[in-house]
Amino acid sequence: MGEQRFRQLMSQIGAAFAQADDGEEKRRLARERERQHEQWLAQREATIVEIITTMRQLGLSAEDLS
């Protein structure tokens, strides 16, 4: 095998590994986005509960807000 062919094969192997690593990185980013979305949903739910609690404490209803 000539040096040029060897370098070509090594380049192809490197590209294959880069693609495999890229796939893992994409999966990691997707998991991170999912985790952030879950946090956002939890914060939203906590805010809604806080609003409802405050309204009940003040004796307010949805009709009072309109």
Image: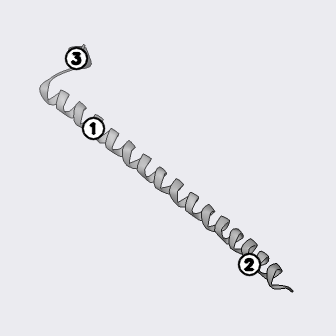
The x and y percentages for residue 1 are 86, 86
The numbered mark at residue 65 is: 3
Disc 1 designates what residue? 47
- Which is nearer the N-term, disc 2 or disc 1? 2
Place residue 44 in its image quadrant.
top left
Neighbour class for label 1 at 10 Å: few (<14), some, many (≥20)?
few
Residue 45's image quarter? top left
- SS class of the residue under badge 3? helix
Residue 8, position as x, y percentages in the image: 78, 75
User: Closer to the camera: disc 2 or disc 1?
Assistant: 2
Q: Amino acid at mark 1?
A: Thr
Look at the picture and state if 24 lies above or below 59.
below
Residue in view at x 72 percent, y 74 percent: 11
Q: Residues within 10 Å of mark 3 (few under 14, many from 20)?
A: few
**Image depth: mark 2 or mark 3 in front:** 2
Q: CA distance from mark 1 to mark 3?
A: 17 Å
Residue at left offset 69%, top offset 73%: 14
Left or right of 31 on screen, residue 61: left
In three-dimensional space, the C-alpha distance between marks 2 and 3, rounded to whole angstroms, equals 69 Å
Which x, y percent locates residue 19? 67, 64
Which kind of residue does numbered mark 2 sit on? Answer: Met
The answer to whether the residues at label 2 and label 1 have Cβ atoms under 8 Å apart is no
Cα distance between the residues tagged 2 and 1: 55 Å
CA neighbours of label 2 inside 10 A, class few (<14), some (14 to 19), many (20+): few
Q: Would you say 5 lies left or right of 55 here?
A: right
**What residue appears at the point 43 percent right and 46 percent down from the top-left corner?**
37
The residue type indicated by label 3 comes to Leu
Query: Which residue matches tag 2?
Result: 10
- 60 lies left or right of 21: left
Among numbered discs 2 and 3, the one appearing first in the sequence: 2
